[in-house]
Image: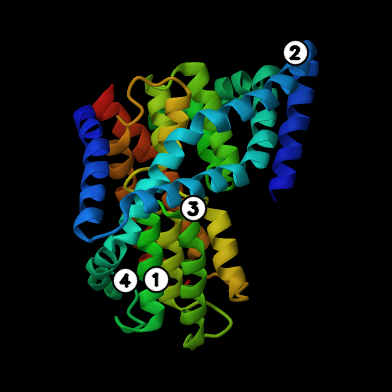
């Protein structure tokens, strides 16, 4: 399974560049334009990352995660998720930068390639900032009633946490 | 919302450190945290910019149009209130394609345009129709070919195989997306 990841990256890059050449695109100009946008979007999340990485590292230093993990352990073991990643799962639908700060701290603590690190990566990568998307999209057309969007999307997110944990355990454990 | 969470995180860590007698570690972590964040941004920059650059090539070369066309039949089944060639559906498929390719900056404006177009012919007026709910549900479970931020964070944390989790992320996203669609359909059927 890991082999797929290794092939994907070079293939996507080479195929995209070749496709660009065939379609007579100035590929290097397009690349640098996109890379510049990357810098700007990274800079635009930097201030919130500074705030949230600080808050997460305070929580970590205070011993809060150990208390919470010990508390959540029985429930998590029952459904098959590592308890260490549950705080990330709860944060994911609410804040993008917050969950990236949390993922960063988990990867540093347990190692990016550990079972916990991989589960956390999959969890953070497979869902979106649900509340943000709902607020922005419905808010933009002035709709306060969102019908079943919140329950449907949030239940899906919770199922996503389980899928992430099971998937990593099945193929990587 | 985020303000409360942020304040809550700091208040809880103060309380927790006070009770466990770790005030000194906490005080150090404030300075370390801010420092770590800046290092993190720098460590992520290379990978992030590489991918936004590559995806820009895909966009400029017209790959986005090809992908949008391929998605159209599936989308018109999920959102039957709008014609396949309507401006609303064109914005919908452009938005979802931008998400798929990780063109974050382009995705949000396209999504807002899609909502605006859909609202124009929405008979419910004060509430979203089924297609609008479905569109937002699709957006909350967004699929992405290369989850750039995750790859960059893994690279920054010294992963030996930053991209090894890609297949798991795809599988989980597809399952989560399917769950979201099914749940929304079920809830609509019972009248929510």
- Disc 3 with disc 1 on a shared chain: no
Spatial CA distance of label 4 from label 1 is 11 Å
Spatial CA distance of label 4 from label 3 is 19 Å
Write the residue at 56% across / 20% down.
A70
Spatial CA distance of label 2 from label 4 is 53 Å
Secondary-structure class at tag 3: helix
Does residue B149 appear left or right of residue A167 in this picture? right
N-terminal of the two: label 2 or label 4? 2
The total number of labels drawn is 4
Write the residue at 31% across / 47% down.
B145
Which residue is label 2 attached to? B20
The color scheme shown is rainbow
Secondary-structure class at tag 2: helix
The answer to whether marks 3 and 1 mark residues whose Cβ atoms lie closer than 8 Å is: no
Q: Which mark is residue B92?
A: 1
Please state the horizontal and vertical placement of residue A110, each as a whole percent of the image.
47, 17
Q: Quadrant of the C terminus of chain A?
A: top left
Spatial CA distance of label 2 from label 1 is 52 Å
Secondary-structure class at tag 4: helix
């Amino acid at each position: 399974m890991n082999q797929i990841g290794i092939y994907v990256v070079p293939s996507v890059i080479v195929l995209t560049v070749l496709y660009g050449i065939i379609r007579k695109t100035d590929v290097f100009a397009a690349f640098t334009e996109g890379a510049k946008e990357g810098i700007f979007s990274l800079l635009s999340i930097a201030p919130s990352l500074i705030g949230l990485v600080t808050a997460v590292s305070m929580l970590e230093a205070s011993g809060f995660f150990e208390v919470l993990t010990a508390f959540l352990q029985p429930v998590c073991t029952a459904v098959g998720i590592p308890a260490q990643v549950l705080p990330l799962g709860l944060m994911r639908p609410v804040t993008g930068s917050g969950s990236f700060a949390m993922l960063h701290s988990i990867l540093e603590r347990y190692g990016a390639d550990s079972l916990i690190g991989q589960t956390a990566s999959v969890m953070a990568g497979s869902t979106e900032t649900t509340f943000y998307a709902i607020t922005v999209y419905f808010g933009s057309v002035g709709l306060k009633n969102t019908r079943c969007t919140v329950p449907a999307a949030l239940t899906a997110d919770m199922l996503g946490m389980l899928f992430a944990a099971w998937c990593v355990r099945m193929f990587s454990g | 919302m985020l303000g409360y969470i942020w304040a809550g995180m700091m208040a809880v860590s103060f309380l927790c450190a006070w009770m466990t007698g770790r005030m000194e570690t906490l005080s150090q972590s404030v300075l370390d945290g801010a420092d770590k964040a800046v290092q993190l941004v720098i460590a992520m920059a290379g990978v992030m910019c590489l991918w936004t650059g590559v995806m820009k090539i895909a966009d400029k070369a017209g790959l986005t149009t090809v992908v949008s066309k391929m998605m159209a039949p599936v989308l018109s089944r999920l959102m039957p209130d709008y014609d396949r060639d309507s401006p609303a559906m064109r914005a919908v498929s452009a938005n979802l394609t931008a998400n798929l390719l990780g063109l974050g900056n382009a995705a949000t404006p396209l999504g807002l345009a899609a909502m605006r177009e859909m609202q124009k012919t929405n008979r419910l007026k004060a509430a979203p129709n089924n297609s609008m709910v479905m569109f937002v549900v699709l957006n909350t479970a967004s699929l992405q070919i290369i989850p750039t931020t995750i790859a960059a964070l893994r690279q920054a944390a010294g992963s030996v195989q930053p991209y090894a989790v890609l297949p798991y992320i795809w599988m989980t996203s597809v399952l989560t997306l399917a769950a979201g669609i099914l749940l929304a359909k079920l809830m609509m059927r019972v009248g929510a």
